[in-house]
């Protein structure tokens, strides 16, 4: 059977751009701040690591992750975000000092960096939503 190349080529529009999961995307989580964060979407790796770490942390609580203190969950979530989504930062200046990626990651794991952690999650969520929109558009083609 002979394949129509035009029809076969049209299937490209149905494919998800997997490079976003490798290369990430730059996001400005707050339009009023110059901070830009390069992040991957929150995917299966993030969710699996989060669940695994929460279960391990809850072993002393009968395995009930709902009993984990908020601070423990925040710490786990920050580690998973760093390990499975965040890739780089730009324009992160704190106290007149430009932070590199490693310093930013260390800061968002501290109590004083909670608002920055919120921005990092916002960036990852924005990347996740952009990916979902691209998938939706691909399905509509």
Image (spheres, rainbow, N blue to C red):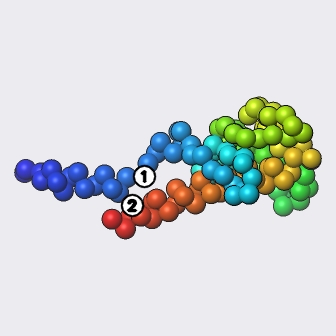
Is 96 on the left or on the right of 79, as rendered? right
Which residue is rendered at x = 72% and y = 48% of the image? 34
Can residue 49 be seen by looking at this rendering?
Answer: no
Which residue is rendered at x = 87% and y = 46% of the image? 113
Which residue is rendered at x = 84% and y = 53% of the image? 115
Q: Nearer the viewer, residue 62 or 91?
A: 91
For label 2, the residue is 138
Closer to the chain start, of discs 1 and 2, is 1
Report helix, strand or loop for mark 2.
helix
Is 71 on the left or on the right of 5, as rendered? right
Percent x, y for residue 87? 65, 38
Which residue is rendered at x = 42% and y = 64% of the image? 137
Image-quadrant location for residue 81: top right
On residue 16, the disc is 1
Percent x, y for residue 22? 53, 39
On residue 39, the disc is none
Is 106 on the left or on the right of 22, as rendered? right
Image-quadrant location for residue 94: top right
The C terminus, quarter of image: bottom left
Say whether marks 1 and 2 touch (CB < 8 Å): yes
Q: Nearer the viewer, residue 57 or 126?
A: 126
Q: Nearer the viewer, residue 51 or 83?
A: 83
Q: Callout 2 environment at 10 Å: few (<14), some (14 to 19), or many (20+)?
A: some
* Label 1 to label 2: alpha-carbon separation: 7 Å
């Amino acid at each position: 059977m002979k394949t129509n190349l035009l029809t076969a080529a049209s299937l490209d529009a149905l494919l998800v751009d997997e490079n976003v999961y490798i290369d990430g995307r730059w996001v400005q989580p707050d339009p009023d701040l110059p901070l830009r964060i390069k992040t991957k979407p929150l995917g299966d790796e993030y969710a699996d690591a989060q669940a695994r770490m929460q279960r391990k942390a809850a072993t002393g609580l009968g395995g009930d992750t709902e009993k984990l203190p908020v601070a423990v969950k925040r710490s786990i979530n920050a580690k998973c975000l760093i390990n499975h989504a965040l890739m780089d930062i730009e324009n992160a200046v704190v106290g007149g000092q430009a932070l590199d990626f490693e310093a930013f990651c260390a800061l968002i794991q501290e109590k004083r960096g909670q608002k920055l952690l919120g921005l990092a999650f916002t960036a990852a969520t924005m990347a996740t939503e952009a990916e979902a929109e691209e998938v939706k558009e691909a399905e509509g083609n």
